[in-house]
Amino acid sequence: MEAIKRAAVIVTGASGSAYGLRAIQQLADGGAEVVAIFTPTGEAVARYEVGLALDGPDRAASLASFLDLSRTATVRVADDADLFDPVSSGSNAPDAVLVVPASMGFVASCAAGLASDLAERVVDVVLKERRPVVFVPRETPLNLIHLRNLTTLAEAGAAIVPAMPAYYTMPKTVDDMVDFVVGKALDVLGFPHRLFERWSGSEPALDG
Ligand SMILES: Cc1cc2nc3c(=O)[nH]c(=O)nc-3n(C[C@H](O)[C@H](O)[C@H](O)COP(=O)(O)O)c2cc1C
């Protein structure tokens, strides 16, 4: 798999904004150029759940400050309403897309191929270019419509990495549980991280 140099991270209106923000932080601090796209509900839920305010004049600076990104990190916050954004085209598509967290509404729109705003269009484009697309769905319980839409996306080439933290890593904090899920999503991209201790046998995983 090609190394991921440019990634789009789409934060939708599902609960779990912390997953998306951690993914942006890991990719950006890990050296990838990140385009962050918040759907309107994704932005509202992030404000509600973690207090992220992106309504200042420089949205990228607000995000970088909130995430305490390194000075070398490259993050741009694209406008979900702007279908003229460069990443809207297959000729300038990112190397990969993470939809994290992914709401069932967004999953449905992508499964139907609507491409009616920038976030949906980027997923559509990266799937057609046969590059990695990872959905981290967050809903429970799942109804048959959700399951069918997720199946459609998997059939179209997307990876489905549900927001299901493991317990064999002995998580002690909510951040540990967030890190496990984000680490699993980054594993699909082959993007290096140290977000969780890998299973190495029957002994409990230790700190460090
Ligand atoms: C606080 C809050 C939490 C939500 N959590 C979820 C969720 O976990 N999963 C989900 O599918 N939708 C959830 N929703 C509903 C979606 O935000 C809603 O369906 C929205 O239209 C999705 O749009 P978007 O994801 O395209 O932004 C939540 C809404 C709110 C206000």
Image: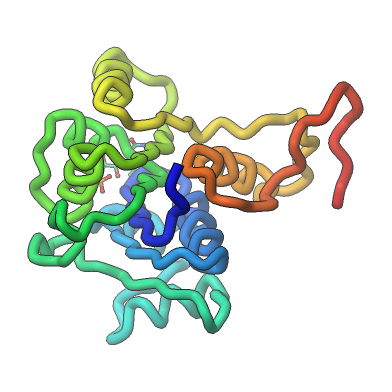
Q: Residue furthest bottom?
A: 57
Residue 133 lies, with reference to residue 33, above or below; the image says above
Residue at 55% from the left image edge and 40% from the top image edge? 187
Going by the image, does 79 lie left or right of 24? Answer: left
Q: Residue furthest top?
A: 144
Report which quarter residue 165 is drawn in. top right
Going by the image, does 148 lie left or right of 29? Answer: left
Residue at 24% from the left image edge and 36% from the top image edge? 105
Q: Position of residue 68 (x, y in %)?
A: 57, 76
Report which quarter residue 79 is drawn in. bottom left
Indicate the colouring scheme: rainbow
Query: Ligand 1, what quadrant?
Result: top left
Question: Who is closer to the viewer here, 143 or 110?
Answer: 110
Residue at 32% from the left image edge and 84% from the top image edge? 58
Question: Who is closer to the viewer here, 78 or 32?
Answer: 32
Report which quarter residue 7 is drawn in. bottom left
Q: Position of residue 116 (x, y in %)?
A: 8, 47
Question: Who is closer to the viewer here, 11 or 46?
Answer: 11
Question: Who is closer to the viewer here, 96 or 111?
Answer: 96
Going by the image, does 176 lie left or right of 17? Answer: right
Counting the numbered discs, the total is: 0
Q: Position of residue 66 (x, y in %)?
A: 51, 74
Residue at 50% from the left image edge and 41% from the top image edge? 185
Residue 84 lies, with reference to residue 196, above or below; the image says below
Residue 142 lies, with reference to residue 199, above or below; the image says above
Q: Position of residue 35 (x, y in %)?
A: 33, 64
